[in-house]
Image (cartoon, rainbow, N blue to C red):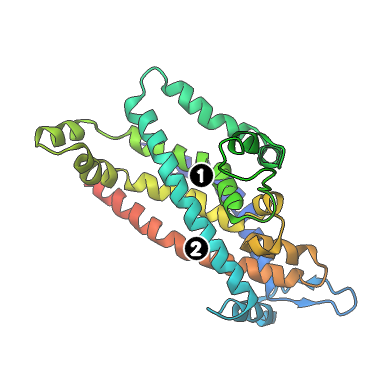
Amino acid sequence: MYPRRYLIALGLPGLIWVAMFVTVALYALVAIAVGGVDPLLLTPVPAWNPLHWSSSWLTSVGTDLKPFSGPDWVVFQRTSIYIAVALAGSILIGYPVAYYAAVCAKRSKGLILALLVAPLVVSYMLRMLAWVGLLSPGGWVNAVLVPLHIVPSQFDWLSGRPVTVVCGLIYGWIPYFIIPLYASLARFDTRYLEAARDLGAGGLQTFLHVTLPMSKQGILAGTVVVALPMFGDFFTNGLLSGVGSTAMVGTLINTYAQSQTDQALAAAGAVWLTVFLAILLLPYLRSSARATREVAR
C-alpha cells in the first residue's frame, strides 16, 4: 500500500536508536570483556580491534560457572531458583487478574488497567523503599501478622530472607507480566468458551483445553518480559536483603563493576549473562514465529 521508501523512512529512526544505544553499547561491553587491564591504574583497557581480543576474562568467569564448581555457579543457581519461584508467583497472581480484566470486567476494565499502570509511574526505587518501611520490625506487615501469631514479635523480614527477595521480585515486575497477558486475552474469542460448554465441558476442562492453550503466547510474552530483567536485577536484593547469602547474578556483576580491579570481570560476566538470556529467548521467538504463520494461514 505504501512505497518502500516510506517504510524505510519510518523504520530508520528506530534502527538508528538500536544501533547507537544497543549494538554499540553491547560491542563496547564485549570489547571490555575481551580486552586487557592497565598495569598501573588497574582499569580495563577495551580491545576495539577484534584481532586483539583475548578470552582470558571470559574463560575466568566461564570456569566459575561450571556446574557444581566455582563460586559464581552457586550464585547463578540461587538466582535461577529465585526467578523460577517469582515467575510461578507472577503467573498464579497475574493470570486471574489479566483474565478478569480482559474477559469478565465490563465497566471496571478501565479502572483495573489504570491500577496496573499506576505503579509504573512511580520510580522502582521508591516502590522498593516503601516496602522497606512496610517490612521493618515495626512496620505494618508485622503489625498485621504478629497479632495473628503468624510470625513472632519483632520479626525482621530484611535480614537476608529469600522469601523477602522473591516477594520483592514479584511485586516489582508483575505489572510487566500482566499487561502483555491482558493484551493476549483481550483478543480471545469468548465464543470458544460457549462452544466448549455446549459440548459438555466443565469449567476446569474448558480452562485447560481452551483458555490456557489460546493464552500461551501471552504467558510466554509476559514470562520473557519479566524473567530477562530479573536476571540482571541487583537493586531488589540489595535493598531488601543486602547479605551475601541471597546475592544474585546482578548483584555479583554490580559488585565487580564497582571494584576498580574487577571491572573487566564484570563485563565478562555480563557477556555470559547476555548469551544465556539470548538462549532463553530462542524458544519464545520460535513459538512467536509459528503463531504468526498460523495466523497468516
Identify the residue at horizontal 66%, vertical 54% (top origin): 237
In this picture, residue 84 sits left or right of residue 159:
left
Mark identifier at residue 11: 1
Identify the residue at horizontal 17%, vertical 38% (top origin): 202
Where is residue 214? Give x, y as percent.
27, 43
Q: Are marks 1 and 2 in contact (CB under 8 Å)?
A: no
- Give, as a three-letter code, the residue at label 1: Gly
- Give, as a three-letter code, the residue at label 2: Ala
Q: Secondary structure at mark 2?
A: helix
Q: Residue furthest top?
A: 107
Picture quadrant where residue 136 is located: top right
Q: Secondary structure at mark 1?
A: helix
In this picture, residue 277 sits left or right of residue 139:
left
Q: Nearer the viewer, residue 178 or 33?
A: 178
Q: Is residue 175 visible?
A: yes
Where is residue 81? Give x, y as percent.
51, 61
Q: Residues within 10 Å of mark 1 (few under 14, many from 20)?
A: few
Where is residue 210? Give x, y as percent.
22, 42
Quarter of the image where the N terminus is located = top left
Q: Is residue 260 above or below residue 24?
A: below
Q: Nearer the viewer, residue 139 or 132?
A: 139
Work out how far the residue at label 1 is from the one at label 2, CA to CA, in angstroms: 24 Å
Q: Is residue 31 visible?
A: no
Mark identifier at residue 278: 2
Q: Looking at the image, how many numbered discs can be counted on the residues?
A: 2
Q: Residues within 10 Å of mark 2 (few under 14, many from 20)?
A: few
In this picture, residue 11 sits left or right of residue 135:
left
> In the rendered structure, which disc, 1 or 2, sits on the residue that comes first in sequence?
1
Q: Mark 1 vs mark 2: give the one in front.
A: 2
